[in-house]
Image: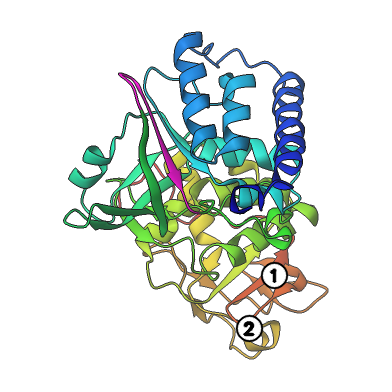
């Protein structure tokens, strides 16, 4: 009787596998072609079938189906490591196709990483995934007990598949939240750790102030006609957080048009930093400050200034720019004010610093 106690799981897994396979195929077909994207390398049927069979035998039925029917989602580089998600994490959740595709890409690295390779990495090291600018972090290593955690998730089935250029491990849970309130926050839903330029862990993705609040800010900015500034902030956010590890509260001044978003990365980062104060300041707090009061920003040696004597309808301006929409987002740690235009730097990027 024990062997039949879970007979009812079979149709659930079959249906889920079929639905997810269909989503994978339809998502791939509906994605616009990109000239910059390399065609995926061919994977032999033997490797794909063996990998799928091994996953299925270990209880990773959904991942086995996806790997067999839509391998192009995973194999886009010469070397590949896949961290397979358990069925139980995907069966009892409802996630949109675009997020499923991103999640699977986030569980795939363009590197070959056997468990021996993982054990050789220092704890806190990061490595790339197929999602641009989103990395995974080795958060725990116990070589003696042969245990490792990625993004605080245990690698429960190490080296399930160990081929010349392909490695597949099984993990206990997804590396990013599947809660609906997190998934539907917008295009920055993958909750990745913050890593610096040396691929070292700076801050965990599990800290809601670091990930969810910033994600909420970017989503709100993009949905309130501050799209270009949201894009600029998102593109340099990792570097800002890497430099300010203890950034617990901020004030952001968001312009509706941010022409600097097309600028080179160093210049864009400087200008975005100029729009952020390392403390929370409400509109009342700012209005209470005297004229010419300096405001420290995240850009070294470049402050903002209260300018109350300019001709503005609201009566309060920063660097001569009116705060037209005070406190469009406010929480315990963050506050965002809408301004009429972007601030200009007093020192231009070509000047020596």
Picture residue at 23% right of the left edge, 38% below the top: 117
Q: How far from the left and from the top, in percent, is residue 148?
A: 31, 53
CB under 8 Å between callouts 2 and 1?
A: yes
Instruction: Please name the residue shown 33% across and 21% down the image.
Output: 163
Q: Does residue 278 appear to the left or right of 224 in the view shown? A: left
Image quadrant in which you'd find residue 71 = top right
* Residue on which the image places disc 1: 337
The residue lying furthest to the right in this view is: 313
Residue 46 falls left or right of residue 289: left
| Residue 190 falls left or right of residue 294 | right
Residue 34: numbered disc: none
Q: Name the magenta segment's main secondary structure.
A: strand
Q: CA distance from mark 2 to mark 1?
A: 11 Å
Labels 2 and 1: the sequence-earlier one? 2
Residue at left offset 43%, top offset 64%: 302
Q: Which residues are magenta?
A: 162-172
x, y (%) of residue 183?
69, 54
Colouring of the image:
rainbow
For the residue pair 279 and 170, the one nearer the viewer reads as 170
- Magenta stretch contains residue 71: no
Front-most of residues 26 and 306:
26
In the image shown, does 315 or 311 lie closer to the viewer? 315
The answer to whether residue 188 shows anywhere in this view is no
Q: Residue furthest bottom?
A: 288
Q: Mark on residue 286? A: 2
Foreground: 157 or 233? 157
Give the percent coordinates (x, y) of residue 229. 65, 51
């Amino acid at each position: 009787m024990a062997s039949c106690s879970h007979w009812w799981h079979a149709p659930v897994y079959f249906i889920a596998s079929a639905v997810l396979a269909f989503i994978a195929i339809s998502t791939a077909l509906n994605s616009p072609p990109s000239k910059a994207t390399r065609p995926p390398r061919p994977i032999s049927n033997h490797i794909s079938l063996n990998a799928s069979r091994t996953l299925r035998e270990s209880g990773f039925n959904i991942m086995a189906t996806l790997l067999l029917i839509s391998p192009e989602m995973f194999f886009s580089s010469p070397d590949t490591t896949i961290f397979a998600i358990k069925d139980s994490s995907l069966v009892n959740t409802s996630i949109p196709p675009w997020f499923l595709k991103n999640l699977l890409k986030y569980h795939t690295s363009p590197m070959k990483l056997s468990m021996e390779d993982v054990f050789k990495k220092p704890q806190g090291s990061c490595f790339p995934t197929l999602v641009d600018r989103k990395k995974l972090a080795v958060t725990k290593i116990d070589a003696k007990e042969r245990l490792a955690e990625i993004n605080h998730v245990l690698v429960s089935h190490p080296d399930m598949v160990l081929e010349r250029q392909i490695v597949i491990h099984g993990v206990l849970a997804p590396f990013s939240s599947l809660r609906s309130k997190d998934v539907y926050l917008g295009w920055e839903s993958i909750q990745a750790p913050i890593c610096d330029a040396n691929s070292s862990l700076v801050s965990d993705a599990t800290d809601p102030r670091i990930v969810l609040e910033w994600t909420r800010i970017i989503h709100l900015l993009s949905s309130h006609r501050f799209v270009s500034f949201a894009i600029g902030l998102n593109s340099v956010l990792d570097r800002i957080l890497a430099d300010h590890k203890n950034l617990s509260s901020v004030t952001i001044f968001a312009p509706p048009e941010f022409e600097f978003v097309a600028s080179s990365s160093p210049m864009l980062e400087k200008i975005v930093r100029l729009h952020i104060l390392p403390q929370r300041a409400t509109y009342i707090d700012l209005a209470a400050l005297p004229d010419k009061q300096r405001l420290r920003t995240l850009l070294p040696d470049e402050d903002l200034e209260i300018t109350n004597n300019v001709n503005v309808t609201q009566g309060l301006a920063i660097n001569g720019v009116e705060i037209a929409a005070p406190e469009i987002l406010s929480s315990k740690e963050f506050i965002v004010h809408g301004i009429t235009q972007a601030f200009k730097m007093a020192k231009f990027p070509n000047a020596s610093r």
